[in-house]
Image (cartoon, grey):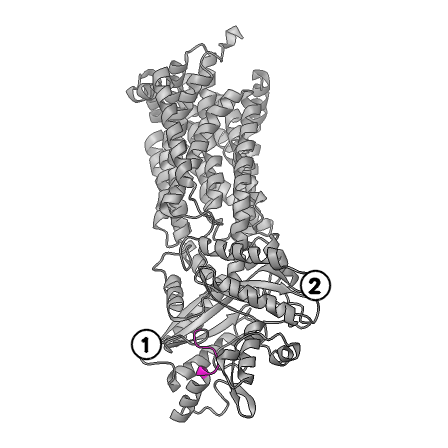
Amino acid sequence: MSTNKSSMLENSIFKIRPVILIGFLLLTVFFGYNAKDVKLSTEFEKMVPLKHEFIQNLLRHIDEMSLGNDIRIVIEAKEGDIYTDDFLQLLRQVTDEIFYFQGVDKANIQSLWTANVRWMEVTEDGFRGGEIIPPSYDGSATSLDQVQHNVLRSGQVGRLVADNFQSATVYVPLLDQSGGKNKIDYKAFSKQLESDIRDKFQNDKFEIHIVGFAKKIGDLIEGASGVALFFLIAIGITFVLLLIDSKCIRSTMIVVGCSVIAVVWQVGILTLLGKGIDPYSMLVPFLIFAIGVSHGVQLINEFAVESFRVNMKLEAAKLTFRALYVPALLALVSDAIGFMTLWTIEIHVIQDLAISAGLGVCALILTNLLMIPVFLSYAGASPAAIRSMSKKESSDSVIWRTIAKCASPKVAAVSVVIAIIGGAAGMYISKDLKIGDLDAGAPELWPDSRYNLDDKYVNDNYSVSADVLVVMVETPAYACTDSKAMRKMDRFMWHMENVPGVQSTLSVVTVSKRVITGFNEGNWKWASLTRVQDIINNSVQTVPGGLVNTDCSLAPVIIFLDDHKAETLDRAVAAVKEFAEAENDPDIATFVLASGNAGVEAATNDTISHAQNMMKVLVYGVVSILCLITFRSIRAVICIIVPLALTSILCQALMTVLGIGVKVATLPVIALGVGIGVDYGIYIYTRLKGFMEQGLDLEEAYFQTLKVTGKAVCFTGLTLAIGVGTWIFSDIKFQANMGVLLTFMFLWNMVGAIWLLPALANFLIRGKIKPINQQ
């Protein structure tokens, strides 16, 4: 933009300073008033990729299938077994209590006390069965013996009853309520589980274990509430360090205050749009604050420089705005559009994160780029800050002079070789980067968390895992028990049971085999699927709910997995696809993925796997195009982008080494890191280009650049790394992982801008930028 146009813009803004301040004050009050009503958003449907093939298949049968949203309440007898009246009465009380929880599927609750869990045996007179705990139960020794006998012939050992008979389970499916007033509030639901189940019924004799999606999300929200404390700590650390560096409390308060105001605006706008903050987007307010501080440091440094030169507050503010509004605007627009590339990942929590980050950066364009210079035009800089800047202007810093050698030919050559070696090593290590969870239980939580200890207990004591993959077998109407379809299902179950990581399978075929065995005096030699249709029809007359739908066009096969680790899911899904490709026949049976919690996890992993590379291409593409438009030089784009790319590669290598998989919680980190990191490169390149246009050679121009903006870049990187490093102490593991990754990216983006950018400039722009008087 020409100098005349810049002057016109400055004059237009600074002539109406009172109006701008009053407008900002009113907007802050308005958005702040709305921000107080922000809510935590925890809908189950937001966590899954609703447009993925697996989920679309499931949604076609949503009235006949579970979305995998359930909880299991396990009651453990610390001494003895479950066959005591005290234990069974406690199990009954828990079953009754959970019945009245909002959001539970009351008709499908299962425990030893519910009528839908029955025993069955074969007698001389045929089949005989009944409720496991009969209405005649009175707590006597005879009744307890009867219950024990019923459990053993019910087939529930390893499912609702532990293999060692020391605990029993209440299985509670939840209703899929995606909207309206009746949607499940997982935070409240989890607290109710703690207060009305664990705290109420757990005692010295019995221990309660609770697992399931709702409980995991509730624990995440509980732990994530500590993010507010980390945010306040980060503000405090930033304020102190900025005050020490700037030596001006006025400037420090303005930068920190405007950055906090941007967060208030962001949260207020989200509330007005009817959106909330979920556990995965709680980092966004901190990032908005971080970006605000990053730009604010540049502004107050430049203001101190201009105040030393002109000694007039208003004029210094104008010159500051003139010098930095183009690179600042470019950096912020790059941030906003870069963050919005996360929208391409069709998982609502990530899309909401993209919206939240984009809105926050848009708020920064006004609160920081415009408000800080206007405030400074009234407040000015302290004499101490101006004196400090005058010393720096006139001094010949040994540190900056040493770092400026990065732009010299010899050092630049070594730097580029080191970068190439580092990038190659990072790519080699990151080839083993996994998609999805790499740990058992809930990897978002620490291994010693209450939830993961409960999950470990369930997996150690029950034959049937809580990680379930459901394959939907679609057939023509009233043909799901046709002998041809049943034989295909039988072969499929055998195929899956031989896949590593699969514990067992269950379907209508399982019921048919058991009944046919019963018809033949319980002789297990008959435990096979017959080819005679009439016998099959007789064997499936009383199929339990959930194994066939009402018109017998759907017969799910339930596959119990060892865990939901990425490798386990990949093997299981690949095995299903292999069988389906060979055996699918629409006239007989079609095997369709997927339901169950493991099916939803597999769909999420697949979505992330396909989206992560596209997201990187988009975020780097957008940033590159904006830099190209601004600087009109491909060489400039390379100088700015290559250090960012190196940081991304090294970050992926770090994830591989630390055993952190790419998933919903970690995927946005790379895009967010690039968005923040590009700011450093833009500010440094803008200054470097300006000094070269004044006739300085590259090394001297870079030295002058470091004197002006180097300290601000280093200060910002170190301060933000210290602030986000506090997350490492979070009660939530995935937030601690984010803290590690973001700390690494903040530091390496800073190092890349200071060290690698001038080295690249030595090869790409040395001698290419002519002084203005020679252009």
> Is 245 a magenta residue?
no
Q: Relative to residue 329, is residue 615 depicted above or below?
A: below
**Residue type pointed to by label 1:** Lys
Magenta stretch: dominant SS?
loop
Secondary-structure class at tag 1: loop
Give me the C-alpha separation between circle 1 and circle 2. Answer: 53 Å
**Nearer the observer, disc 1 or disc 2?**
2
**Residue type pointed to by label 2:** Asp
Report whether 85 appears left or right of 485: left
Q: Relative to residue 28, is residue 99 depicted above or below?
A: below
Say which label, 1 or 2, has the lower sequence index.
1
Quarter of the view holding residue 439: bottom left
Front residue of 353/245: it is 353
Mark 1 residue crowding within 10 angstroms, few (<14) / some (14–19) / many (20+): some
Location of mark 1 (residue): 78
Q: Which mark is residue 67?
A: none
Q: Give the range drawn in magenta.
A: 151-158
Residue 77 appears in the picture as rendered: yes
Location of mark 2 (residue): 587
Residue appearing at x 51%, y 10% in the figure = 772
The image position of residue 28, as x and y in percent, is 53, 43
